[in-house]
Image (cartoon, helix red, strand yellow):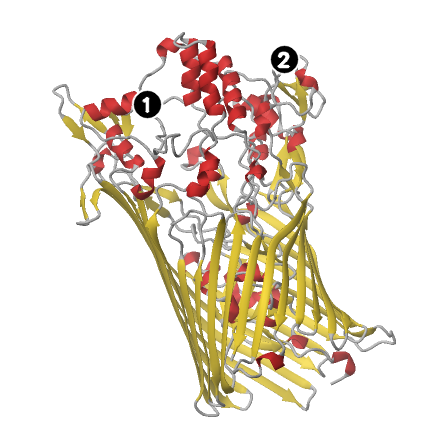
Amino acid sequence: MDEQLQEVNITVNTGYQKISKERAAGSIAQVTAKDMEGRLQPNLLDRIDGLLPGLNLVRNISSPQNSKNNLGIEVRGRSTINAQAAPLIVVDGMPFEGDLTAINPNDIASITVLKDASAASIYGVRSSNGVIVIATKIGSAGKTKINYSNTLSFRGLPSRSYLNQMSSAELVNFQKEMFNYRSGDYAVIDPRKAMNDVYRILYDRKGGVISEEEMEKRLDVYRNRDRFTQMGKFLNTTRFDQQHNLAISGGSDRYTYHYSLNYTQPGDYNKGRATNKELGFSLKNNFKFTDWFSLRANVLGKNQNREGDIGFNFYDNYMGGKASYYLLENEDGSPAQWYNSKSQFEIDRLKALGLEDETYIPLNHVAAIHEKFYNKYINLNFAANFKIIKGLDFDLSYQSERTEGYNGTLNRKNAQSVVGMVNDATQIGKDGAIKRNIPQGGQFAEQRNDVNSYTLRGQFNYQNNIQGKHEIVAIAGAERRQINNRYTNIYKYGYDENSLVYKGINEELFGIQIQNTQALFNSYTISKKETGFKDLVDRFVSFYANGSYTYDRKLTLSGSIRMDQSNLFGTNIKNQYKPLWSIGALYHLPRIDCEPLDRWSVRATYGVNGNVPKDNGPYLISRVNNNLNYFNGEMQAYIDSPPNPLLRWERTKVFNVGFDFSLFKDRLTATLDIYNKKTSDLLGNTPLDPTLGWDMVLLNYADMQNSGIELGLNGKMIQRENFSWNSTVNFSYNKNKITNLYVEQNTPYYYYYAPQNRVGIPMGSLYSIDYAGLNDKGRPLARKADGSLVETTQKLTVDDLIYEGTTVPPYTVSFRNGFKYKDLTLSFMFIFNGGHVMRGVHPEFLSKYAELNYNNNFDKLWLNYWKNPGDESNPDIAPAFVSAASGNISDIFNAAHKFVQKADYIKLRDISLSYNLPAQWIAPTKLSYVRLTGQVLNAWRWVANKDNLDPEVWAGYSTVTSPSRGIQAPIIYNLGVSVGF
């Protein structure tokens, strides 16, 4: 091989074929099991975090990136608005429909990300979001090898100080202030409604029942209470997780095997609470019966189950929940009673009438709700290879997947939700006769979700090297695939868990407001809680081909084409036969007279990927309504989407140019990719003239562009006999923008309340109002584009808003270092996300909290609001309390420009220390190696925002209300042991 082509012999697995990386023109990133050594994260996605340029994990479930993305992964930004946004997952050559947790990270041999059209278009209509190809370990000829590893994880309770919540004393004083603004007339208080304990004391003082001194004495009791001091009895101070892995592999020249077993049990902060028990397994067999016939037989499976009482979550209540002066145990040690909507007077009145007892005692309510959950997954994967002639063989592959999901929740007859519902729907006649429209007894909810799929593929493979100069590699095949998703949701009333018998209910009452009931407002509507049944079938038939020609191992030309047919496309032949294709070229440039440069090559590809909606299509879609028709009591349906034969599936055109080079005798290697993705015919719900029959309909209504740069640097910084230092930097930049829209919103509210699409700006962008402070009465003011001030958003236009930027980080960087001294290895990784914005935490506009019940904790920022003239000079102060205010006024403050902050952050994602016991220490045993590993996750972070908010958990990306700060990611300590025989 020429010197400029000498490189590590890397094989890239695209799922359909394995090719040498030196012939791959596409943009491909890959990590192997060796790259993941020392990383003890229990799930696959966390283990590869930061290792692959262009692949980003979206940890914040509130982020716009997670819309229509069940995996929380993005490859090169987002290429769709309303269609499926998650990348396609391929495991051992076949599309994967199961839960990624079914894949044991310790079984991974390699993970390959196909990012451009040349690499991904072979996967057809599901390739627009990128493709992640996972190859699991296989056995090798030789003696049997046994490997065992376990990981123990520890994490303490998250800090409550991060939540910045009021103390009990602050909350009581705050309630006292609010009471003085608007408390209502003592004489007209409805005795049936529950009242906050502090408000009851304040009302007793207002009504003259108690003196000022007695009021303060009683309030001091609540000021000095702190429920969180009682939590130690019910919470584990440390959460403990464990994972165990056992693998056996070996074989001969005719048969190899790799078997593995994995057991995982996450812990819980609640003492005694049931947690998932997860058992996974993998059985991989490879047979070589003759020189021309071989067979692969794989079985992958996982079983998750959990069962226990969940009637009260102490951890959730510790991190927020009720006001801190509500105790779990009274001072005498007895269980404390809490009140929800009804007062003790009303509870006693209902009991006297012979109705259900609605007394709620949290400690006694734990067993009132019981949950049973399981998820079973099985994957059968078979492949036969037939060698026909030299250079030509045929693969016949079949995969069957089945997922059986179940979640049953029993609300026992004493559950708060059950007794309240039964009582609220009950009518009592003038003669005292009780008519229960909802039967007594427990209530049982059951959801089942079964997914069955199969893939059948036949593929010819051709490879020939002519005279050592001309290499031809080609594949051609056909594929049939079906996915059947069955979903059942039932809800039964009057359920008895011992006999499994339930009572019927008059379904004609669903959706009807029942009058003269025992509800607080004397009427009640029974909502139908079960959605019934769904049976969805997606079918695909595909034809594809891929080929490449390489001249003298320097120049490679490649191309691919695929046509998909599916029942999702309707019957219009124009939608059935639309090819997805790509072309590419790779050239290894001759060595030049430049001492540091060892080798370099240039790649270029262009092609078309696709994406198809699963919830809509070109045909008429009707849905059955859960509730019966009000007038005739019959079942009813409605047209969800009208027929639209012009509807097209989304197409993404991708251009990619890449450069690969190495310097200083392979001490520094780099990969640089520059790409441009243009997606057309984006699908979205678009407003229409309601006189046409629909006010909203799904149309191809938008175009989008993603362009970016990706850089991967790998440096062998120091290489000595007993010491080495390796460093890796992965950098990604993605610029997204909407280039065309069929129609744009013209109401300011839609832009500052939630991300809205607009031509020329990225998806997930944030707008704010130009806040001009408070007037002398404490009212918020907004500044228009012309400089004039207004007191209501009704006088604002879209042009008056401030465009803040995108909430999706355009820059992502990971920096990883590994040091090895003899048998000791230290590694750590920093990650950076930046260039985006978020709406920070802010005080609440105090207008809607003047009612009787302050039962929750609040942020301390709420204490700082306008009280007296002159307070408006404080730029950090919130508006004055008002008895009532519409969103047209409060939004000026809540959506203010002053609260928008940079969302940049840096985290020390992980730091690991591993030690391999010296060979001479274990020589007397039958062990081949022993490795001890310690790892710390989330050890340190830096954030650009002034409120110290963690952007990975903060929920304030789009909403203008003041959400919770979220639960800060705790520091996690992992200890691992790995041994081999």
Between disc 2 and disc 1, the foreground one is 1
Left or right of 320 on screen, residue 779: right
Q: Position of residue 74 (x, y in %)?
A: 58, 55
The residue that disc 1 covers is: 343
Q: Position of residue 225 (x, y in %)?
A: 47, 28
Label 1 neighbour load within 10 Å: few <14, some 14-19, many 20+: many
Report the Cα–Cα distance between label 2 and label 1. Answer: 36 Å
- For residue 259, what is the image quadrant? bottom left
Q: Is residue 51 visible?
A: no
Q: Position of residue 368 (x, y in %)?
A: 30, 41
Where residue 54 is drawn, which disc sits there? none
The residue that disc 2 covers is: 868
Residue sitting at 61 percent across and 25 percent down?
893
User: Where 311 sits versus 599, above or below?
Assistant: above
Q: Secondary structure at mark 2?
A: loop
Identify the image quadrant of the N terminus: bottom right
Q: Tell me the amino acid under the disc marked 1.
A: Ser
**Dot placed on the residue nearer the N-terminal end, 2 or 1:** 1
Q: Secondary structure at mark 1?
A: loop
User: Where 88 sits versus 822, above or below?
Assistant: above
